[in-house]
Image: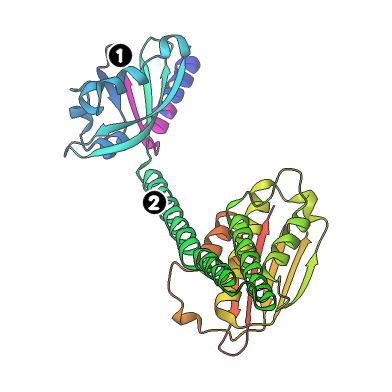
């Protein structure tokens, strides 16, 4: 009997240590929501001492009445998990993830984890997405107004001029030819804009073919010498998320090269090495001093994409020495 009681006492002591030292806040309540027990983390989360907590009900520390109801359906479910807000002693509210379990003696155990940092990150991401969407809308608006609209307006004016020169067939034909070229230019710009908006990697498409289509779309006039090396193993190892981000990285960097680099040679190399994808984009443009690059431009967007995939981003450049971007992404 002594051995049995000793083992039971050791078990209770072990439970008490685990209960007190748990990093998550733990509350034990009765079925009316009266708090019966709490651990140190609960005192830290709520700002109350253990004694003060045992004088309160869940309704006193949960921000909304429905939060209590949502966290106590466990008579039938045994375990439930939800997100609520609790009220700190100083009255500020804290978002938490609460897991409630019905204990064998009829009491309830609530385990609460502070998710403030996660919520802040979710808010940051949501704001970044909205900002990116707004930037994209502005880009589309400018492209339509300042570029495509002007091209079509020029074609329209030229066609009107052609009418005035009739019956001078040679001059009329010349003006109609100019108008046709302007309309073809507008169609090309619309096609480029559509490529930016359409799904990057359509269902069933091979990534190599999608990359080649993107490269052809930016070099219609054959201004660049483009070297493209693609490891066919990538089609077997890259999931949809990786494929989409590889496409967007290439799209973003090509835009940077076209707009800023004055390059004439672009080299793209994608290889699969062990359990990672190595993606290199190099140009022979004017390069730049990385200390002068402002936050928020395309290169930072690329860096964020790579880091979001747990990858490593490297940028090698200097004034007059071109630019090399390297993304190493595990899979």
Q: What stretch is highlighted in magenta?
A: 14-30
Mark 1 closeness class: few <14, some 14–19, many ≥20 residues within 10 Å = some
Q: Is residue 139 magenta?
A: no
- Disc number placed over residue 127 in the picture, else none: 2
- Disc number placed over residue 43 in the picture, else none: none
Tell me which residue sits at (49%, 59%) in the image: 140
Q: In this view, does 204 lie to the left or right of 56?
A: right
Secondary structure beneath disc 2?
helix
Residue denoted by label 1 = 30
Tell me which residue sits at (20%, 24%) in the image: 60
Q: Compared with residue 207, is residue 27 higher up or lower down, i.e. above or below?
A: above
Front residue (pair 4, 16): 16
Q: Is residue 15 left or right of residue 178?
A: left
Residue 184: image x %, image y %?
66, 65
Q: Compared with residue 103, is residue 264 higher up or lower down, i.e. above or below?
A: below
Secondary structure beneath disc 1?
loop
Front residue (pair 20, 10): 20
Tell me which residue sits at (43%, 11%) in the image: 104
Q: Residue furthest right?
A: 232
Residue 209: image x %, image y %?
78, 57
């Amino acid at each position: 009997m002594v051995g049995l009681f000793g083992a039971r006492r050791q078990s209770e002591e072990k439970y008490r240590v685990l209960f007190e030292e748990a990093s998550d806040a733990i509350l034990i309540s009765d079925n009316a929501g009266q708090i019966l027990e709490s651990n140190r983390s609960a005192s830290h989360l709520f700002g109350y001492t253990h004694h003060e907590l045992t004088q309160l009900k869940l309704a006193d520390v949960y921000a909304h009445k429905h939060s209590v109801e949502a966290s106590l359906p466990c008579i039938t479910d045994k375990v439930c998990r939800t997100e609520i807000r609790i009220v700190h002693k100083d009255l500020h509210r804290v978002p938490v993830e609460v897991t409630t379990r019905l204990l064998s003696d009829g009491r309830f155990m609530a385990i609460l984890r502070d998710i403030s940092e996660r919520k802040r990150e979710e808010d940051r991401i949501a704001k970044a997405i909205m900002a990116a969407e707004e930037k994209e809308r502005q880009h589309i608006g400018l492209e339509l107004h300042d570029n495509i609209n002007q091209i079509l307006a020029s074609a329209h004016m030229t066609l009107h001029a052609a009418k005035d020169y009739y019956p001078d067939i040679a001059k009329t034909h010349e003006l109609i030819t100019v108008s046709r070229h302007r309309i073809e230019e507008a169609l090309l710009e619309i096609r480029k804009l559509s490529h930016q908006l359409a799904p990057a990697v359509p269902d069933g498409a091979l990534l190599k073919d999608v990359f080649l289509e993107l490269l052809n779309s930016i070099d219609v006039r054959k201004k660049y010498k483009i070297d493209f090396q693609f490891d066919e193993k990538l089609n077997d190892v890259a999931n949809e998320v990786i494929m989409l981000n590889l496409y967007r990285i290439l799209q973003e960097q090509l835009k940077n090269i076209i707009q800023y680099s004055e390059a004439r040679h672009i080299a793209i190399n994608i290889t699969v090495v062990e359990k990672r994808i190595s993606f290199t984009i190099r140009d022979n443009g004017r390069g730049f001093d990385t200390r002068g690059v402002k936050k928020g431009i395309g290169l930072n967007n690329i860096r964020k994409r790579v880091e979001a995939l747990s990858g490593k981003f490297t940028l090698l450049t200097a004034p007059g020495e071109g630019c090399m971007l390297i993304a190493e992404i595990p899979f």
